[in-house]
Amino acid sequence: MPPQDLKTIMSHGLLSFPLTDFDADGNFNAKAYAERLEWLAPYGASALFAAGGTGEFFSLTGDEYPRIIQTAVETCKGKVPIIAGAGGPTRFAIQCAQAAEQAGAHGILLLPHYLTEASQEGLIAHVEAVCKSVNFGVIVYNRNVCRLTPDSLAMLAERCPNLIGFKDGIGDIELMMSIYLKMGDRFSYLGGLPTAEVYAAAYKALGTPVYSSAVFNFIPKTAMDFYHAVARDDHATQHRLLKQFFMPYLAIRNRSAGYAVSIVKAGAALVGHSAGPVRAPLTDLKPEEMAQLHALIQGLGPQ
């Protein structure tokens, strides 16, 4: 897919990160993963991010990664575009990006590099190296140790024509507005804070109406309903769902570091689409937390 086509896809609709399925021993379960994608594909997401943050990219091996992307591409061909997660050390991120391109993915979301802090010069070199290693579109994820400035993004945009998207996972409104005002329509923009629904209306006002939904993994109908409410400026529906589900959901999610992923896997298990346990260093929800989440899901009705 040409980079500009990916940019068009990124410019509208709801996106989501499917969970990666593991069996009871913690190994990748390709059959269950394909079944998950087949279940989610008809609900109307504009694109799915395979092996992204919610897909536990950070815990995958180099051998598993190509299998996951290949499974996603083959399962969703003709149904929904697949954008692959890629990240970590520069050379590993390049390996992932090239494997995703070879598998037929439509582009990559470049997740933050690993562990160490870096200067703007170093971040530019990292992103540029990954972009120049592939021909398809790249979306950069501003989060954690990767915090690109507007000037750095402008430099990257000039050097890398296939850098077509920017995802914000920091939540610094001043920085986000500075980036949007400087870069304009050079990028497509994606809201990417955990449980993005809580911030969706605010980000729409900043010129970023598109976001990625983690809860789409287990309440896809509600996730789409909420997205459409944001698109229509239907504040009554937004406030009802925020009060009924999302704020109590956050209260559970915030009890432990790493629960932003764990609670999504818990939700999938509760609706009959288990993706298996999370991998260490993440931990699964406790029984009482599972019960509380189950009650919230039940209150939403059929999905």
Image: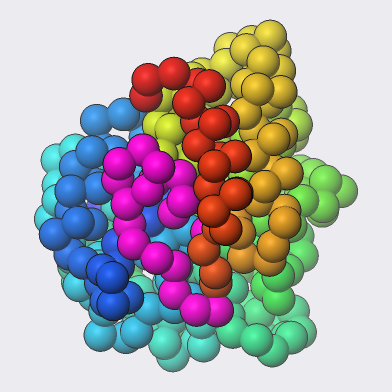
Instruction: State the image quarter where residue 131 is shown.
Output: bottom left
Instruction: State whether residue 296 appears in this view.
Output: yes
Asked whether 245 or 41 is in front, the reply is: 245
Asked whether 56 or 10 is in front, the reply is: 56
What is the magenta range? 261-281
Q: Is residue 159 above or below residue 184?
A: below
Farthest residue in the right direction? 174
Q: Is residue 243 above or below residue 121?
A: above
Quarter the C terminus occupies: top left
In the image, is 228 to the left or to the right of 75?
A: right
Q: Is residue 7 above or below residue 244?
A: below
Farthest residue in the front direction? 288
In the image, is 230 to the left or to the right of 199?
A: left
Asked whether 162 or 33 is in front, the reply is: 33
Q: Which residue is pictured at 55% across the width and 79% down the height?
A: 281
Q: Is residue 236 above or below residue 57?
A: above
